[in-house]
Amino acid sequence: MKRLSYDAVIFDLDGVITKTALVHGAAWKAVFDEYMKYREQRDGEPFREFTHENDYLPYVDGKPRYEGVKSFLESRGIHIPYGEPEDDINKETVCGIGNRKNSKFLDILKDKGVEVYPSTIKFIENLRDKGVHVGVASSSKNCKFVLKSADIEFLFETRVDGEVSAKIGLKGKPEGDIFVTASLNVGVLPEKAVVVEDATSGVQAGRNGAFGLVIGIARERNTEELLEYGADVVVPDMEYIDIEWMDKWFRKKPVLLSDSGEDKGAEEFLSELEGKNITINPCYYKNGDEALSGGREPVFFLDYDGTLSPIVERPELAVISDEMKDAVKRLADKYKVAIVSGRSRKDVEKLVGIKDIVYAGNHGFNIKGPGISMMHPEGEKAIGMISELAAKFSEKLKDIPGILIENKEFSVAVHFRLVEDKFLDRIEETVEEQMQGNDKLRLMKGKKILEIMPAVNWDKGRAVRWLVDILGVSWKENTVFYFGDDVTDEDAFRILRTRGTGILVSKEPRVSAADFRVASTEDAKELFLKALG
């Protein structure tokens, strides 16, 4: 059996696998119309009907039940006590109203049963036949009941739903927690997995989870909205998606990496979609000039090694040139700029030497800038383990010529750029042996480097998203750029995909989640100067 380039597909439930989205809509309408009429009679507030287009889709669809109640009521300027999940269905609290909706939903299901989308079930069966892991992730606390009622529970290796989320403290959509958890449950990193969703909050969650491909299903004729919130492609039904085409997406990616014509394949790839009822996100058609002159104020996130300074044999030799430093300083004088590096924050701050900008070190575990100071709490807990591991590596590998063990406080890096090939297997075996059985740490492989860091859902991409929020940056009002060269920068490229611009700094073309490619740090500097006008 040919191995595919992706290892898992995580499906939303309502509107993707089952036709229960319509049942949810009917139950919400019944409950909210009843409540709004009650307020009219009691308080004299004019009754305004709860509608599918104006209320269900923007405020309720895809969200955890109580969040949906709160969101809708706030849209009408109504604020009531949150209450407790155990509240009676007649209690006037967010939880009480949510529980009343759930009661109506279950009554309708018991009366009419559960219908499925045959095309989705067929697609799932085909995935399973090809050895792809399949999971379901839903905000609904009724997910298990619905799957059992439809007799399809056996199709899924993992189920992460409202009950699971409440138990382990996962955030609801548009956060990517439930999808990421489902993917990790089947042993697959999000970068090698696909999310299938029909709600805007769901495709946003897939993007925030940094998944390799986010597919939107436009059951509500909401293609444009799904694309706007982060879907890579949108289809009216799963019958239009092909398993092999998805494989090609991961192997080739429709990326216009440069305007020189040397990186071919994107136009050919996109042309294959013509006449197939697949709408691809407009971001895949933009060119470099359009990205730089989009009319919105730019924000720059910049890696250091290989982006601001050339890759060198030893990390201490990676020095930023005076010309590059001047370009970055000028950029920072005019726009928001943050340096996001795998180096320790203090190290990269010293190397760059520009005051009053943000520095995110250790892949974002340690961030500091004007009015900002953050150390990831789970990362801090691992500092002692990291130190012990660095000492063990130094002892066990000290006889290998050219090896360099770097303790970066939140991580330890094993550099082997200067090591002969005959030692490489021993290095990797030693690293894996020392990590064996330790589920609090994870291994990342970069350019001639093995790096061990805390096993938490945090990386450069999530650090960039955190900074976007804390800096008051808007995906819609700003053009967010990320420049990077290494595999660790792919996390940031995937977070930016469809809503920002990722630029890969690489001499040779390669498969990447970036939007464009420049060949050198010098070319990156030229783009900085171009952005300055």
Image (cartoon, grey):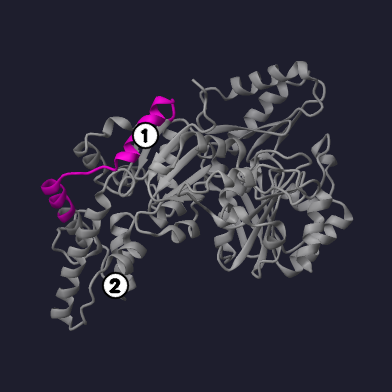
Residue 365 in view in this figure? no
Check the image and name the residue furthest to the bottom: 44
SS assignment for the magenta stretch, majority? helix
Residue visible at 19% across and 58% down in the picture: 27
Q: Earlier in the sequence, mark 2 or mark 1?
A: 2
Q: Check the image and report above or below for 432 versus 158.
A: above
Residue at 65%, 39% in the rendered image: 511
Quarter occupied by residue 472: bottom right
Give the amino acid at mark 1: Ile
For label 1, the crowd category at 10 Å Cα-Cα, with few meaning under 14, some 14 to 19 and many 20 or more, is: many
In the drawing, does residue 49 fall left or right of residue 239?
left
Residue placed under numbered mark 2 in the picture: 79
Label of residue 124 in the image: 1
Above or below — where is 355 with respect to 278? below
Q: Tell me if residue 327 is in the magenta stretch.
A: no
Q: List x then y, in percent, for residue 242.
A: 46, 37
Residue toward you, 36 or 293: 293
Most extreme residue toward the front is: 275
The image shows residue 353 at horizontal and vertical percentages of 80, 56
